[in-house]
Image (cartoon, helix red, strand yellow):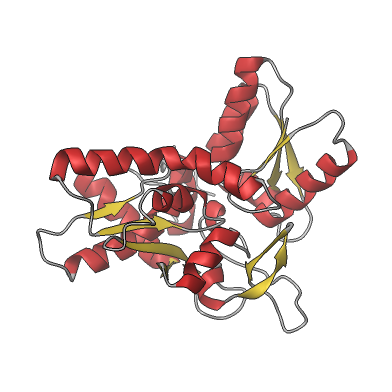
């Protein structure tokens, strides 16, 4: 089994399944993501997976996908590629969306059970867009439910300073699908930035592009500093450390909730855990962990 991973969540999930079924597992991961997502790298290795460091390009998710696809195309007779988001060639976007849709169906039923109605707004972070596609899919036919995706606004709106594909990208082809892509005037894929490894990608799933063009989903972006503030807010008020990916959605959810009546229901897809990001957040803030400082 071959997989790629950015934040490491998909890598750990693939490694877990391979350990359960006794399959050989190779996970491609950018060198920069290996550095900032060390806990998940350690977990993958404990589960028996081989984590192959990708040192080309920006050394992040895009480059990990490049290497995984190269491997797969040269070894297709003996390998299977498990792509981790709703991107790539058909049928990957549909496969990933349908598996991720479990959370959407469960959230829908829980809202009906608890509130006797559907939520007013649903929010999720967007990198490739898998968790958001799964959450939104259960509600996409409900016109009264507002759907909002939140991308990585990075440091600024300048090219190379963010990963907000649906905010600033143009139609193009990346990794086998036609979708919005961050690219230069010559159509070359742009460099991107985010403190979040899982959102650090210059493309997006094609279904998200369709929802954007159809006007069904609204796409916003949150800056690095806003995501860090949201991380702190959820940890201190709810006792939950969210993944930095999820923190982007939380940042905008707090803004939107503050503008709405108190009887409205705002549902946020809490798509990942933040213990994997704790050391990187400490490094960014210059904090000391375990008596040592990087």
Q: Can residue 240 be seen?
A: no
Residue at 53%, 58% (x, y): give it.
127
Farthest residue toward the bottom?
A: 185
Nearest the viewer among 148 and 286 is 148
Residue 197 point in image, percent of width and height = 56, 53
Residue 165 point in image, percent of width and height = 56, 69
Q: Against 18, is 214 above or below?
A: below
| Quadrant assignment, res 110 | top left
Q: Against 19, is 5 above or below?
A: below
Q: Is residue 212 left or right of residue 85?
A: left
Residue 146 point in image, percent of width and height = 31, 63
Residue at 34%, 44% (x, y): give it.
241
Q: Against 283, is 99 above or below?
A: above
Nearest the viewer among 174 and 232 is 174
| Quadrant assignment, res 170 | bottom right
Q: Is residue 152 left or right of residue 110?
A: right
| Quadrant assignment, res 16 | top right
């Amino acid at each position: 089994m071959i997989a790629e991973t950015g934040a490491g969540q998909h890598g750990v999930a693939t490694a877990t399944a391979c350990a359960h079924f006794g399959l050989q597992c190779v996970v491609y991961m950018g060198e920069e993501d290996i550095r900032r997502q060390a806990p998940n790298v350690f977990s993958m290795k404990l589960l028996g997976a081989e984590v192959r460091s990708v040192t080309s390009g920006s050394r992040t998710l895009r480059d990990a996908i490049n290497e995984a696809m190269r491997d797969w195309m040269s070894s297709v007779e003996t390998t299977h590629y498990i792509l981790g988001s709703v991107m790539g060639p058909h049928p990957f976007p549909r496969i990933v969306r349908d598996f991720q849709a479990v959370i959407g169906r469960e959230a829908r039923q829980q809202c009906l059970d608890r509130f006797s109605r559907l939520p007013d707004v649903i929010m999720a972070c967007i990198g490739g867009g898998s968790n958001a596609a799964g959450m939104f899919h259960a509600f996409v036919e409900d016109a009264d439910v507002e759907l909002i995706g939140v991308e990585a606004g990075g440091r600024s709106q300048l090219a190379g300073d963010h990963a907000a594909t649906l905010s600033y990208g143009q139609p193009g082809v990346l990794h086998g699908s036609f979708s919005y892509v961050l690219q230069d005037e010559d159509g070359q894929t742009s460099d991107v930035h985010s403190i979040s490894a899982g959102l650090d990608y210059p493309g997006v799933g094609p279904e998200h592009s369709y929802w954007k063009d159809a006007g069904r989903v609204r796409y916003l972006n949150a800056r690095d500093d806003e995501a860090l503030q949201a991380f702190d807010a959820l940890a201190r008020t709810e006792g939950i450390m969210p993944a930095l990916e999820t923190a982007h959605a939380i940042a905008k959810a707090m803004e939107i909730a503050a503008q709405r009546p108190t009887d409205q229901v705002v549902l946020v897809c809490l798509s990942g855990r933040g213990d994997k990001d704790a050391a990187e957040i400490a490094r960014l803030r210059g904090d000391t962990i375990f008596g040592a400082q990087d």
